[in-house]
Image (tube, rainbow, N blue to C red):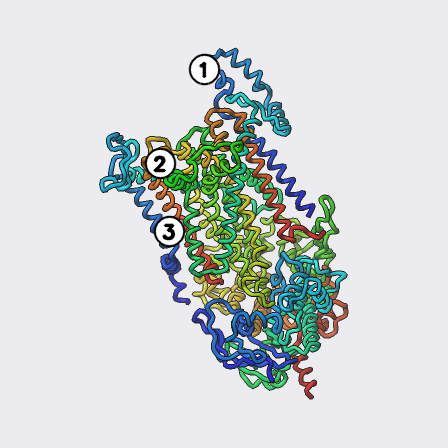
Amino acid sequence: MIAYLAKRLGIATVTLVLASLVVFAVLEIVPGDPARLMLGMNASEAQVEQLRDQMGLNAPLIERYLHWVSGLLSLDFGRSYTYSVPVIDLVLERVVVSLPLALIALALSTAIAIPVGLYSASRRGAAGDAVAMGAAQLGVAVPNFWFALMLVYLFAVWLRWVPAGGFPGWSAGVWPALKSLLLPAIALALPQAAILARVTRSALIEVLNEDYIRTARAKGMPYRAVLWRHALRNALIPVVTIMGLQFAFLLAGTIIIENVFYLPGLGRLVFQAITQRDLIVVESVVMLLVATVIAVNLLVDFTYAIVDPRLRGRS
Amino acid sequence: MSARAQTPNDGMASWIGKAFANRSFLTGFLITLLVAVVALTSFLWTPYDVTKLIIADKTQAPSLTHWFGTDHFGRDILSMIMVGARNSIAVAPVAVGIGMGIGVPLGMFAAARGGMVDEALMRLNDLVFAFPALLSAIMITAIFGPGAVNAIIAIGIFNIPVFARVGRAGALSIWPREYILAARAAGKSKTQITVEHILPNIANQLLVQGTIQFALGILAEAGLSYLGLGAQPPMPSWGRMLFDAQTRMVVAPWMALFPGMAIVVTVLGLNLLGDGIADILDPKSRRQR
Amino acid sequence: MSLLEVENLSLSIDETPILKSVELSVAPGEVIGLVGESGSGKSMTALTVMRLLPHLSRTSGRVTFDGIDILAATEDQMCALRGDDIGMVFQEPMTALNPVKTIGEQVAEGIRWHTRAGRAEAEERARRILDRVGLPEAKFPLSRYPHELSGGQRQRVVIAIACALKPKLLIADEPTTALDVVLQAQVLDLLRDLVAENHMGLLLISHDLAVVTEMADRITILRHGQVMEAGDTARVLSEQVHPYTRQLTQASMHVPERRPNAAAHHASSTGADKQGALLQVEKLTRLYPGRRLSLLRRGEPTRAVDDVSFSMMPGQSVALVGRSGCGKSTLARMVLALDKPSSGSIHFRGEDLTGKSEADLKPARRNMQVVFQDPYGSFDPRQKVERLVAEPLHVLDKVPTRRERREMVAHALHEVGLAEPDMDKYPHEFSGGQRQRLSIARAIITRPKLVVADEPVSALDVSIRAQILDLFAELNGKLGVAYLFITHDLTVARAITDEVMVMHEGRIVERGKTGEVLDHPQSEAAQALVAAAPDLHRAIARRMQEQG
């Protein structure tokens, strides 16, 4: 168990270091001088040079990388060129929108998909299965931002139940804030739920064909009981794998969805920062997102070890 | 039995027969064919010229003259969807081609070599997977400039690790088979075995994954062009049309409805096609309870 | 009166008839053997009694268990019977247990389900039955997981699950087919004792006539879903009234006629004459790295093959026998240069094979071919016979033209009893026995001096097995090819080989003339193998004796 977890942790760390190198390298080759951008076209060459010195842009490459990484580790992400505030403040302000959004979406998608998958697998070939899987087939094909537009039209424009966009902030109260996250979360969650339901169903059906299911049936347990007690846990590995991948997808999906709903989240921050060449913000937010994805994958690996005793080895 | 084996074409014919008896395959095939025909037709003919802006006709509701209505510049939405289909249809195969062409050999190479080579390639794969695909696609197109070509390349790059994984996993499941051992005992090299035995036996899995990535590619392209990073105006694209529709939802909801439905139908068709192929190639999955 | 009564049972699955008017009965305390070759419908008979048939199955006739009409019973009634009154043991122990649940949970589950016992009580009973099947607490606590157990141990767990509630009827479907002979004998003993202790009825399903003869009071012989003959075991097998019974019995005891070839005669059993040896293996060792105990520490490496030396003369047929996991397949792979030895040397026709590159191995490969066990897995399903059989030809110095190639393939097919048009077919168009003929055709196409055969007949039905053994014997005489036969089945060794090497825990512990070693084994390992091996002659004789 320890050996397995240590190995996964090691791999995650290596991936994180490589990722930081990639992010740093990519932003090195981006065209456009941030100092020039900040000062505008009218600034003199000397002024720009002075600012570059100030911002540490003239230091050697390795020194800048190390400076950046040590900054990341001590949560000092530097200052935004365009907003002129510490990046950490920007990130903190936005993360309280994006993280709850992704989490709600993930919870929603799981809460829908697992029961639907179980239902379909237990009634394979029946009408209920066909309807559920038909809906899932359709759900997989729907782009979430278009689905978001349709939701806005239906619930905000037509029925006027929820606001069409914007975020009042948590200071306005938990309910109004949640209410403005509701449609975006649904828009993100449903297409993902469709994928997850299909995966759950096929994983269950695969497991139900295993020999040990027949052994359990020969013990005198009814089909449903075998499904719950034997099949579900064995089917969890592919399901958890997909959930891990989906979290990464949901984080990135917020970029588009936040644009649809005018939510001040990380996705919009990074998108705007890219178009404004605010590299320090891009670097920091991308690194943050990548670190989150790696952490979630690590969590998935740990879940494997809990679910599957074969990974634990002899204790 | 022996009579059937005499003509090799017979196998192909029975495959086609089986394929069209499969409902998923048939539906998916017809939808995909329809989209392809529409895209090709747009080169020769569209109901209206999409390059002409007729402000007098702006945001007209669907009618007999404009089946899907018009947009804020008075362009016919149906015509724009037809032209936009070109883009979507073109993006996916190129992106899948990039992913397959690089990813599959990498994955098979890793499986054949094993050890450090395998480990290194898999770590590289982990690295790419750590970057949410859409985020990276945004970065790539933002850095190298928005446009259809860069969007294709960005989507293609993120197909590489997917195919590398499928190729590697498939190859790893074939390597321990006895017929590989027999081929090795017959003195075949790892490269020969990979080309002669591994690749033909994982082709099915690759084909199925291909249709999935095809559909995902269309969704990704729509997302990128929605953000303004895909095909640039005046070239119509489905994603861009949705972006334009967003601010006009109250006055012209059809501007959002029809391009979105075009995406859904296309992706649905490809997914059905993929499901159908998987079904036909692995009849076991249908027979089992 | 009978415990289980099957009358006029017919079964079809998806319109394909599987069983036709099957009759069968099991009395309490009685052992009934159900024998048949693959596809005879014997497993389906068992699943019908359990009502665990696949979808789209249709049954007709009557199945009565303990007064209950099984075919008409509700699913709830069946659930009450399964595991409580009828227990079942399956063939494949490696996959029959849920990998994510402990053995304690899996044994206790059925007990709790049927008796409504509490967790502690059920676990106590699970403990008792596991002790009974030979898995004592000290080494096998309830908290063990299936992957920590060997195949034989897992089969004991499956038996414990089936017998936990002392069912009236136990159905065992090929319970020992996946085990080696020594484990097979142990598991059969256990089944016999459990049946006697609890006065259970046992329906034993097997393809192995010898196993059934040793175990069963009465046998039923099934073919193509129909009962060929049924009755008292000793009578049926000694009188052999029905032609199919005779065919099965004779095939089971078949010894091919061997034309002695000159080369093999010269070979001395001691291998003292090392000049002119075809294959000479010296101090061969293969280590596998030990289990990782912690991040930095590894356990002792496993010595899969341990300091093995032997030699083979041209044209000689040698058996390498041993229990599963004794290292015989690893040894074979090293001989074939498919695996690298950790130390030691292999000389083939005077040439050292170890440490050679694939290109340098070409001449050796030309003279050394292989036949594998699984007739289904040893062919690429996407290639036609012509390409498959011709695969070894590319080691020839001069690559044959397409026409030459077709001629050579046709010739090889002819030699193994297949026809020329077969070369345009795909492997799935052949039966198991025909595929093994294809394997042999592929092996002899380069006219090799040595063929290594890894369990080449153990996946085949007895009548097919007899034919394939004949083919091996014929080619040995005709082509003078030497065989290294890897097998756990002593009857195969006896049928086809001049000499036997017995392997145990990576070492060769005994070698000698086949007849001598099998009749008078010297080493402990050889004695265990010989004692455990089912033997139809012996079993029938014993049955006859018992009945006087």
Q: Which residue is mark 3?
A: B28
Chain label for disc 2: B
On screen, B260 above or below C209?
Answer: above
Q: Which residue is mark 2?
A: B249
Left or right, residue C482 beside residue C406:
right
Left or right, residue A265 beside residue B15:
right
Which-is-in-front pick, marks 1 and 2?
2
x%, y% of residue C493?
Answer: 65, 70
Compute the Cα span from label 3 to label 1. 55 Å
Residue C248 - label: none
Same chain assignment for discs 3 and 2: yes
Identify which amino acid the numbered label 3 is placed on: Gly
x%, y% of residue C194?
Answer: 69, 74
Q: Which residue is mark 1?
A: A41
- Asked whether disc 1 touches disc 2, contact meaning CB atoms under 8 Å apart, the reply is no
Compute the Cα span from label 3 to label 2. 31 Å
Image quarter of the N terminus of chain B: bottom left
On screen, C18 above or below A311?
Answer: below
Identify which amino acid the numbered label 2 is placed on: Met
Q: Nearer the viewer, residue C265 or C420?
A: C420
Left or right, residue B46 beside residue A127:
left
